[in-house]
Image (spheres, rainbow, N blue to C red):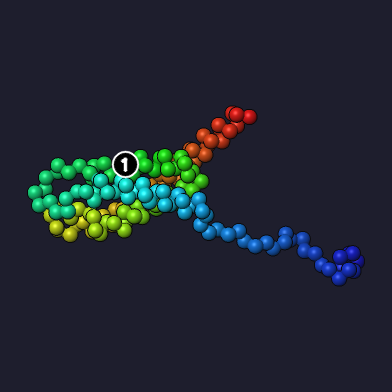
Amino acid sequence: MNDDHAAGGWRSSLPPITEPQRRGVSVQGVWTFLVSAVVGIAIWWPTQAMEPRYDYNHLSHHVGWRWYVPLMFAAALPLTMVFSRQWKWIGAGLVALQLVAAPFTTPRGDNDGLWVLVFPLIVVLGAALTLYCAMLSVVVRRFKRRAVSERR
């Protein structure tokens, strides 16, 4: 008979049960989201909110919309370089305050109702930014690993 059985204790061959790791939001994730949200609204305000609300002339002399998407992707690059481990929060942070401000600041054009399409477009842009940040974070982490290994 085994000594464990004789002592009255039985030991399993399985590893001990441990508490599951907490997968909540980290402090770094909150900061990443907040910084990204401030950057996103800083892009939204001059490119979209400062445009005339109604433009019945259909003149395209307002150029804010031409800068909006390129600036969003350009802003994601340094944010991902700084917050490479928290890349999941950057895309959502960039568009979060824009979704809040959009009903009040989106240009309405000729008031035909198409302005409401800005909401799904912002959501799609947020998803595209998240994928972009995921790819950038892989590249950034590889460069960081290579830099650390070259220092040794």
Whether residue 78 sits left or right of residue 102 in the image: it is: right
Residue at (86% x, 65% y) in the render: 4
Q: 10 Å neighbourhood of mark 1: few (<14), some, or many (≥20)? A: some
**What residue sits 31% from the left and 54% below the top?**
98
Q: Residue 105: percent from the left, percent from the top? A: 23, 55
Residue underneath mark 1: 71
At 29% from the left edge and 49% from the top edge, which residue is drawn?
Answer: 44
Residue 10, picture quadrant = bottom right
Image coordinates of residue 90 in percent, x first then y, are 42, 49
Is residue 11 found left or right of 108 in the rendered image? Answer: right
Residue 88 seen in the figure? no
- Whether residue 113 is visible, yes or no, is yes
Q: What residue lies at 27% left-to-right and 56% top-to-bottom? A: 102
Outermost residue, bottom side: 8
To which quarter of the image does residue 120 belong? bottom left
Along the viewing direction, whichever of 40 and 132 lies nearer the viewer = 40
